[in-house]
């Protein structure tokens, strides 16, 4: 029997409402009227894991069990990812008060058991469809199939309105007049009474304007097939009635794709359905959406849905990033994830007479468990002297709660440290990132120093993340290293007229070395002792060494000037071995100079201007020994350099010191206008001398302290009672207690044991020399 249907398309309009029900916490209950169904969602935090819905009408209260839901047009789903339980009810579902197919009143009870007590809450809602009914509408729900056709139809040959109108009283009065027969894969099954069909789970309904047929999936009279490789379940029911000589027949055919979906490795969830599931129809429009929202195909494609027609099959590809999808992280050894989409799809079909059929699908698509590896990137820049490590692709349902750094645990806020820093980054693709910074000099960082002078910094990181809201932990381990060529500190040195200045910037690994002057470590105390000017702050070390300070070495002495050198040593902080040095040699000039070397050589530059008589020649300068003349002279200044135990040098002993003394003479008659005599001396600590009297070798652990003493004339002898008028000296000599010529020794000693023993020896030797 053929029917003529009317074509019509309208927009989807729906509004989500938050319902208020006595006893249910605010925000826990949501009820909404959609285009072809009513939906209730209740938070699982309120209902628990085993809520029960009950349908209520004037005849009683009916528990919505799994089987009863498929029979009566209900779909109940527990959605832990969303945290709620959801009930969808068809507008033609059982126990719904239908007023002219325009106003539908739903009454449900929600039964909740908590702590052994069962509570029931009444849920009521009145809905009106947001768009007009099409002549034929088919719903492919997740647990049932439903088809409804308009009752006012016209046959091409004649009108059968009267016959159709007779269906309702016949159905309501005596169902034995109506029967249904099923056709299964070209096989016509025997007819059965409607009462028997209802017992098998089939539902038949007549409204003011429509005839409704509903069947659960998997019924014996249904059959499954494949259409272009897509699994389809089809039920072909024919409702008929014999009334006198007239037979009224209505074809109620429904076919739904049962394709469960597949995951495409390119990042899409794919679902398929035949392009035309019914014969004699052709497609006119596709609408696609998620969570009950439908948009036209171009809008869906703008949202990165891919809609294609392959081999007469409609293929919908939903991107994993689609708005409205749901994902959840799990820990199964590694970190995995699942994506879930509640696909809502509509095909608008038409026959040759433009009679419209709407086919709607509700399908839940879920990916398999997919690996979701988080990753780390070592973004360390060695010049910044800090580790920078990026942890990326952290899912939005996870958070970082702790970090173990080389075994030490730190909470993410790092309240127990000031040197660490971690920054959270939120990305547009709904993933998180964390940037960890740890300075190289942090105590938690492992440091090794290799034989090839390379510093190895190592940081082993254990990220602790938790999945929300379960707080299930997940650990991600990584290790990062940094290498620095570790050369000893290098100093910059600058010459000045007053001395040499050294400076260097601090490096975090400079603690591997110690700085020394000779064998003494450079400390503030040592600097104060020797008159160095030292400044050492967090940025740099500055050291100014005045000329003639302890540690200088001098060479290339002439009347024009001399060179002074100062050396700083860098020693390994564990072995004290010298690994490098910084030495600076600078030219200096001075009017007078005296140097006393550790090898027993006295070098003197003396100003003789007041020691030269009128008309005297500078070339006639000499020491006590007239054969020891000046090496260099210019006008009034003379340069002498000689071993201290030659040239008539005398020795004076004082408490703890030995002083070698000589005098510079003008080799002529002393005139009255020569107002000054010049004496030169070197004083050594007695304990530093190795050989005092030997003429073969002089050794001292330290350089001597030299003095140039200018005394007034006339003078009758060379005793130390003469008061000096001027002197160039570093430290004053102690009072003399013994004296003799240094170049006429009568004995040799390797070491002078004590001052008293030495004085006794000197006294005896001096007596012998004078006797001779």
Image (cartoon, rainbow, N blue to C red):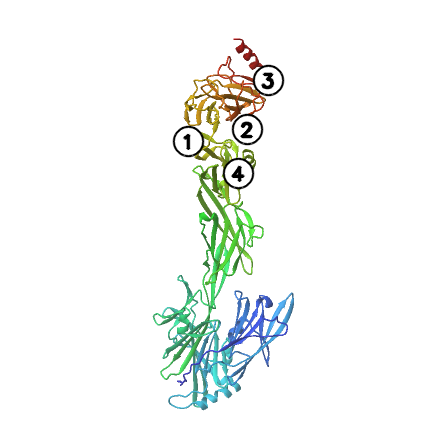
Q: Position of residue 220 (x, y in %)?
A: 46, 73
Residue projecting furthest to the top: 772
Nearer the camera: disc 4 or disc 1: 1
Quadrant occupied by the N terminus: bottom left
The residue pinned by badge 4 equals 533
State which tag comes first along the sequence, 2 or 4. 4
State which tag comes first along the sequence, 2 or 3. 2
Q: CA distance from mark 2 to mark 4?
A: 20 Å
Judging from the image, what secondary structure is the residue with disc 1 in? Answer: loop
Judging from the image, what secondary structure is the residue with disc 3 in? Answer: helix
Compare residues 433 and 700 and report the one nearer the observer: 700
**Residue 84 higher or lower than 542, as above or below:** below
Nearer the camera: disc 2 or disc 4: 2
In which quadrant of the rendered view does residue 229 lie? bottom left
Task: State left or right for residue 38 relative to residue 286.
Answer: right
Mark 3 near mark 1, Cβ–Cβ under 8 Å?
A: no
Mark 2 near mark 3, Cβ–Cβ under 8 Å?
A: no
Q: CA distance from mark 3 to mark 4?
A: 39 Å
Q: CA distance from mark 4 to mark 1?
A: 28 Å
Q: Position of residue 741 (x, y in %)?
A: 51, 16
The residue pinned by badge 1 equals 560
Crowding at mark 2 (Cα within 10 Å: few <14, some 14-19, many 20+) = few
State which tag comes first along the sequence, 2 or 1. 1
Nearer the camera: disc 2 or disc 3: 2
**Residue 12 higher or lower than 158, as above or below:** above
Crowding at mark 1 (Cα within 10 Å: few <14, some 14-19, many 20+) = few
The residue pinned by badge 2 equals 731
């Amino acid at each position: 029997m053929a029917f003529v249907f009317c074509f019509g398309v309208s927009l989807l309009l729906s509004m989500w409402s938050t319902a208020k029900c006595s006893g249910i916490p605010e925000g826990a209950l949501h009820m909404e009227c959609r285009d072809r169904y009513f939906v209730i969602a209740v938070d699982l935090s309120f209902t628990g894991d085993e809520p029960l819905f009950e349908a209520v009408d004037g005849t009683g209260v009916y528990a919505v069990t799994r089987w009863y839901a498929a029979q009566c047009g209900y779909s109940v789903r527990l959605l832990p990812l969303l945290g709620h339980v959801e009930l969808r009810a068809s507008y033609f579902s059982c126990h719904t008060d239908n007023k002219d197919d325009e106003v539908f009143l739903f009454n449900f009870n929600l039964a909740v058991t908590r702590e052994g007590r069962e509570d029931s809450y009444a849920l009521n809602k009145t809905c009106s469809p947001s768009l007009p009914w099409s002549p034929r509408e088919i719903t492919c729900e997740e647990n049932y199939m439903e088809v409804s056709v308009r009752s006012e139809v016209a046959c091409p040959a004649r009108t059968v309105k009267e016959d159709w109108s007779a269906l309702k009283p016949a159905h309501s009065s005596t169902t034995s007049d109506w029967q249904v027969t099923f056709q299964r894969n070209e096989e016509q099954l025997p007819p059965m009474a409607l009462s028997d069909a209802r017992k098998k789970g089939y539902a038949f309904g007549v409204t003011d304007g429509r005839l409704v047929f509903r069947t659960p999936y998997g019924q014996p009279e249904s059959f499954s097939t494949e259409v272009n490789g897509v699994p389809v379940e089809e039920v072909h029911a024919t409702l008929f009635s014999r009334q006198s000589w007239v037979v009224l027949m209505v074809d109620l055919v429904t076919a739904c794709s049962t394709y469960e979906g597949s995951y495409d490795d390119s990042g899409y969830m794919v679902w398929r359905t035949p392009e035309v599931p019914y014969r004699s129809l052709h497609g006119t429009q596709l609408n696609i959406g998620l969570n009950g929202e439908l948009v036209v195909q171009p809008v869906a494609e703008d949202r990165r849905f891919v809609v294609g027609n392959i081999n007469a099959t409609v293929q919908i590809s939903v991107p994993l990033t689609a708005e409205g999808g749901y994902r959840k992280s799990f820990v199964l050894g590694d970190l995995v994830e699942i994506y879930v989409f509640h696909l809502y799809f509509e095909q608008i079909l038409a026959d040759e007479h433009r009679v419209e059929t709407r086919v709607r699908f509700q399908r839940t698509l879920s990916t398999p468990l997919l690996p979701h590896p988080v990753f780390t990137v070592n973004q360390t820049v060695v010049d910044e002297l800090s580790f920078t490590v990026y942890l990326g692709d952290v899912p939005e349902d996870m958070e970082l709660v702790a970090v173990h750094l080389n075994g030490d645990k730190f909470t993410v806020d790092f309240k127990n440290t000031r040197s660490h820093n971690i920054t959270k980054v939120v990305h547009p693709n709904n993933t998180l990132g964390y940037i960890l910074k740890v300075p190289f000099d942090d105590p938690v960082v492992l440091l090794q120093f290799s034989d090839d002078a390379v510093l190895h910094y190592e940081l082993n990181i254990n990220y602790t993340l938790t999945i929300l809201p379960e707080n299930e932990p997940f650990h991600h381990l990584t290790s990062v290293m940094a290498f620095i060529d570790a050369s000893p500190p290098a100093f910059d040195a600058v010459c000045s007229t007053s001395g040499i200045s050294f400076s260097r910037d601090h490096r975090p690994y400079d603690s591997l070395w110690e700085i020394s002057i000779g064998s003494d470590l450079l400390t503030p105390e040592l600097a104060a002792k020797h008159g160095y000017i030292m400044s050492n702050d967090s940025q740099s070390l500055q050291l100014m060494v005045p000329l003639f300070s302890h540690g200088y070495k001098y060479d290339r002495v002439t009347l024009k000037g001399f060179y002074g050198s100062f050396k700083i040593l860098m020693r390994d902080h564990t072995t004290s071995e010298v690994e490098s040095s910084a030495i600076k040699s600078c030219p200096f000039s001075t009017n007078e100079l005296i140097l006393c070397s550790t090898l027993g050589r006295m070098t003197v530059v003396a100003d003789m201007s007041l020691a030269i008589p009128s008309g005297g020649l500078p070339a006639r300068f000499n020491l006590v020994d007239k054969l020891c003349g000046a090496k260099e002279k210019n006008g009034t200044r003379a340069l002498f350099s000689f071993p201290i135990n030659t040239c008539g040098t005398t020795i004076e002993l004082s408490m703890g010191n030995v002083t070698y003394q000589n005098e510079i003479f003008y080799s002529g008659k002393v005139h009255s206008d020569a107002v000054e005599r010049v004496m030169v001396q070197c004083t050594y600590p007695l304990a530093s001398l190795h050989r005092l009297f030997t003429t073969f070798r002089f050794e001292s652990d330290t350089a001597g302290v030299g003095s140039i003493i200018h005394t007034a004339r006339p003078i009758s002898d060379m005793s130390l009672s003469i008061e000096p008028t001027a002197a160039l000296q570093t430290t004053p000599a102690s009072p003399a207690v013994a004296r003799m010529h240094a170049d006429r020794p009568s004995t040799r000693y390797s070491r002078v044991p004590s001052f008293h023993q030495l004085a006794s020896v000197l006294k005896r030797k001096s007596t012998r020399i004078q006797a001779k």
